[in-house]
Image (tube, rainbow, N blue to C red):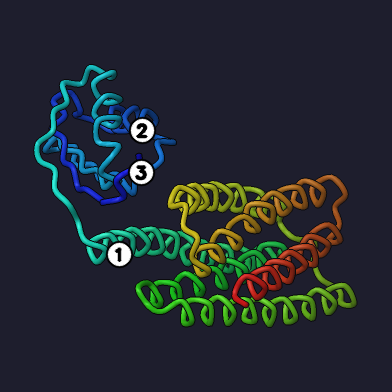
Amino acid sequence: MEKDKKINRTTYKIEKMDCPSEEQIIRMKLDGIKGIQNLEFNIPERMLTVHHEAWILEVISGKLDELDFNSSVHNSQDVTDEDIKSITENIERKLLLIVLAINFGFFVIEMVSGLISNSMGLIADSLDMFADASVYGLSLYVVGKTIYKKKLIAKLSGYFQLTLAILGFSEVIRRFLGFEAVPDFRTMIIVSIFALIGNAVCLYLLQKSKSEEAHMKASMIFTSNDIIVNSGVIAAGILVSVLNTKIPDLVIGAVVFTFVIRGAFRIIKIAR
């Protein structure tokens, strides 16, 4: 017998859900169930709204009953394709706003810190963060737009990254040939650790969305690259402190732009 592909919006009243800990337990319990579109939690009201394929209603209810949180169905109704599209778009907007704010904030922090500490690694990473923030901003614009526009924005963001990488390499070469002071390794390490944490949060949120859209995939590629870059800047800071030379900082600057180029080409490929 073919399964019912209709989508339902089911709201549960969960009496024992009164803090984020219970929310996380419920998320883990329902994680991996095929047919669940998304989960919306309202902890103050102790309500959980699930958008799901109609045939798995009993499966969801059974999983919640196993938790013994005194859960019960408050209401359940069919939703239209337009409702589903609106739900997906709202989720994408929220995620992109969060990662945009994190990336733009660290762009400012790393640029200022890089200029003060004379670190090419931090400056390179800040430009990478700026590229990401620009992409997330553009991605917000295309939420709900046609597939063509989404791919166009992904392609433009790839070329934008490529341009920044070329400019970055030029600055690295200039510093190799010039007489630059040894950067402040403490600032490099501390700022990069915080940037690493911020990017890890962004990647977790983006991967949790499980979006297959070109602009969202591009966002995940950017953030994955950033985590590698942050780790590299931390390592370069340690080497600068041990060797007392600017070379590790310039090397990581060059490596950062290599990742930027590789990510740019991957994004351009996805957008074809």
- Disc 2 crowd rating (10 Å Cα; few below 14, some 14-19, many 20+) is some
Figure quadrant of residue 256:
bottom right
- Which quadrant would the C terminus be assigned to in this image? bottom right
Q: CA distance from mark 2 to mark 1?
A: 22 Å
Are discs 2 and 1 less than 8 Å apart at CB?
A: no
Give the residue furthest to the front. Answer: 1
- Residue at point 58%, 49% (across, down): 196
Answer with mark 2 or mark 1, whichever residue precedes in sequence. 2
Amino acid identity at mark 2: Leu
* Residue 149, horizontal then vertical, whole percent: 46, 82
User: Which labelled disc corresponds to residue 30?
Assistant: 2
Amino acid identity at mark 3: Glu
* Residue 84, horizontal then vertical, whole percent: 27, 59
Closer to the camera, 10 or 181? Answer: 10
Element at label 1: helix
Element at label 2: helix
- Disc 3 crowd rating (10 Å Cα; few below 14, some 14-19, many 20+) is few
The residue beneath circle 3 is 2
User: Which labelled disc corresponds to residue 85?
Assistant: 1
Closest to the camera, between mark 3 and mark 2, is 3
Answer with mark 3 or mark 2, whichever residue precedes in sequence. 3
Q: CA distance from mark 3 to mark 2?
A: 23 Å
- Residue at point 85%, 77% (across, down): 173
Element at label 3: loop
User: Which labelled disc corresponds to residue 172?
Assistant: none
Q: Is residue 120 visible?
A: no
Does residue 230 sit above or below 147 in this rendering? Answer: above
Does residue 199 sit above or below 27 in this rendering? Answer: below
Are discs 1 and 3 less than 8 Å apart at CB?
A: no
Figure quadrant of residue 158:
bottom right
